[in-house]
Image (cartoon, rainbow, N blue to C red):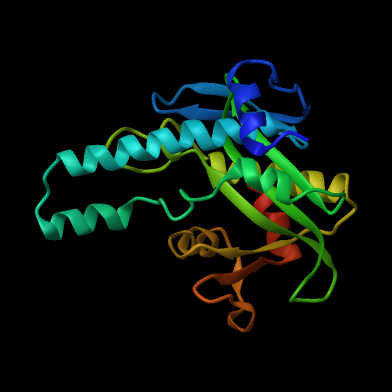
Amino acid sequence: MKSIADIKNLIASGQITQTSGDIIEEGILLDNRSEDVSYQLFHGWDIVRAHQCDEMWGLYNMQLLDFIQAQNFEENRLNEVLATIQVDDSHWKWFKKHFAYQGPEYNWFFLVIDNIPQAACLIYHPKQSAIDGDNIFYIEYIAVAPWNRQNPMSTRQYCGVGSAIIRDVIKYATEELSLRYGFCLHALPRAAGFYAKIGMDSFSALDKDTLQYFEMSAAHTKLYMEAS
């Protein structure tokens, strides 16, 4: 039986190649020059794309922290800059998560532009809604590539990536998994503001330590989809 290290070596050597996966959605996003770019949403278990997330996103995060360090900011300014960057999920290992979360109750999604993963999402279903007890889905993990976030090193490469993958996953969950509109998650502290902004409600009784529980109601999810 091959170890995780063995599989990574096979990927690096090209002996395991990227799977085509199932393209379940295609759409348009804007790049940093306000030009249209096409994306594809892939559904399914894919260790090569998971490995790409770890390698490419991890390298960018290291470059970002090196850049910030090289600016020699005064302490107050450094604290301000560090407060604006979103690296709470930089320790996530998508490759390992791919082996830990398998089975029909889990669904993997990768939003891809030019064969590079721009966002990844793992959902679990069914999950009982805190609002009415109906079946919805729960986002176990979701992240966009760090170059698609505001940072002091470079202009955000693509805009709206997070919203795009959420909307496409909602569409899949309702049309393919027969779930009603609505979803939930536990938000990383720096992401809580985003989820509140898009209309999700918090339920403090379901918080996990520093992670706030958020859920979007069926009615608001419909509005959210119509606004796309």
Camera-side residue of 1 and 195: 1
- In-image side of 180 versus 6 (left or right): right
Residue 20 is drawn in which quadrant?
top right
- In-image side of 90 versus 81 (left or right): right
- In-image side of 123 versus 151 (left or right): right
- What residue appears at the point 54 percent right and 61 percent down from the top-left corner? 195
In this view, 160 is above or below 90 = above
- Residue 228 at least partly seen: no
- What residue appears at the point 53 percent right and 76 percent down from the top-left corner? 209
The spot of residue 93 in percent (x, y) is: 56, 46
- What residue appears at the point 72 percent right and 51 percent down from the top-left corner? 100
The spot of residue 137 in percent (x, y) is: 77, 59
In this view, 144 is above or below 78 = above
Camera-side residue of 81 and 182: 81
The C terminus, quarter of image: top right
The spot of residue 178 in percent (x, y) is: 90, 53
